[in-house]
Amino acid sequence: MGASQSSLGANGSTIGPGLGDIPESCVACVFLYLTPLEICNLARLNRAFRGAASSDSVWEAKLPRNYQDLLDLVPPDLHRNLTKKDIFALLSRPLPLDHGHKVGGALQEVWLDRVTGRVCMSISARAMAITGIDDRRYWNWIPTEESRFHTVAYLQQIWWFEVDGEVTFPFPADIYTLSFRLHLGRFSKRLGRRVCNYEQIHGWDIKPVKFELSTSDGQQASCECCLDETEIDDPYGNHKRGYWVDYKVGEFIVSGSEPTTQVRFSMKQIDCTHSKGGLCVDSVFIIPSDLRERNRKGILK
């Protein structure tokens, strides 16, 4: 009557349809609910899965709605005629917001999280206004492989401590967390081993540092924290000295109704009754809030 959809095995038993019989369009529909990593792993199964894993409709769903704003950061020759899969791969690498025109490389970077396709951002200390940064009695720039920007600001001693910054960007709709990445103590490598010098750490246990953020649509957040608390910070017994610590300033919400969002942020300890020093300032991170725990490195506050 009709063509049979089954075949006979070696022992004469009937073998039903397998993964290779699933239409590519059906596989693509399933891929819409998977992460990019899962899609790439399944692409190795057979031709239909491989074809669906290269579908523009699948990868466009993984890109943020305003991914064209990110592509504008890339020279046109690098993304012209790319598939959506290749565009996702391109945007998953850090892109300089300032096109790397500043001395020492990019000062701000933006990228897509490889698992969720959501926008993340990092801002170098060099892009911030730091009180006294040009006076080497107070601050020094230290080259290091421990920073994505390869340089951190090191405070030797100062009375008025203030760091300010801002960024304007077309963030996609999401809830974002802003945090400062700081390190108590000066670190270096000696005979291939990481060593920390704590001699200049002082003043951070006397008064708290105040962290603040505000957005162009009126959102505000602030918190205070002593950077050099002597008690144990977490169940594993890690202290803040000698570790990179992400200090959460607060969250802000982007609804998507505004073309761009301006975010201002700061940290300060301006009680001039005592000096403070021995602190490395690396960068500020702006990351979707529910990704922060997954992406953290070191200790989070």
Image (cartoon, grey):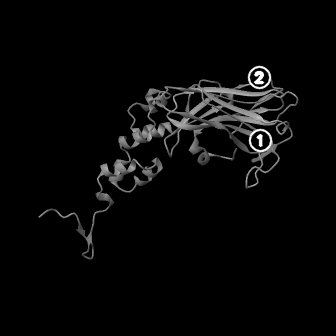
Label 2, label 1: how far apart the Cα atoms are: 22 Å
Task: Tell me the tag on residue 188.
Answer: 1
Residue drawn at point x = 43 percent, y = 32 percent: 79
Is label 1 in a helix, a strand or a loop? Answer: strand
Q: Is residue 105 visible?
A: no
Marks 2 and 1, the one that precedes in the sequence: 2
Quarter containing the N terminus = bottom left
Asked if labels 1 and 2 touch by Cβ distance under 8 angstroms, the answer is: no
- Asked whether 107 or 33 is in front, the reply is 33
In the rendered image, residue 200, in percent from the top left (x then y), is placed at: 85, 37
In the rendered image, residue 19, in percent from the top left (x then y), is placed at: 33, 59
Amino acid type, callout 2: Asp
Residue drawn at point x = 53 percent, y = 42 percent: 113
Residue drawn at point x = 44 percent, y = 42 percent: 62
Residue at the far bottom in the pictured view: 11
In the rendered image, residue 284, in percent from the top left (x then y), is placed at: 65, 34
Amino acid type, callout 1: Ser
Residue at which label 2 appears: 134
Q: Is residue 198 visible?
A: yes
Is 17 located above or below residue 269 in the figure? below
- Asked whether 180 or 100 is in front, the reply is 180
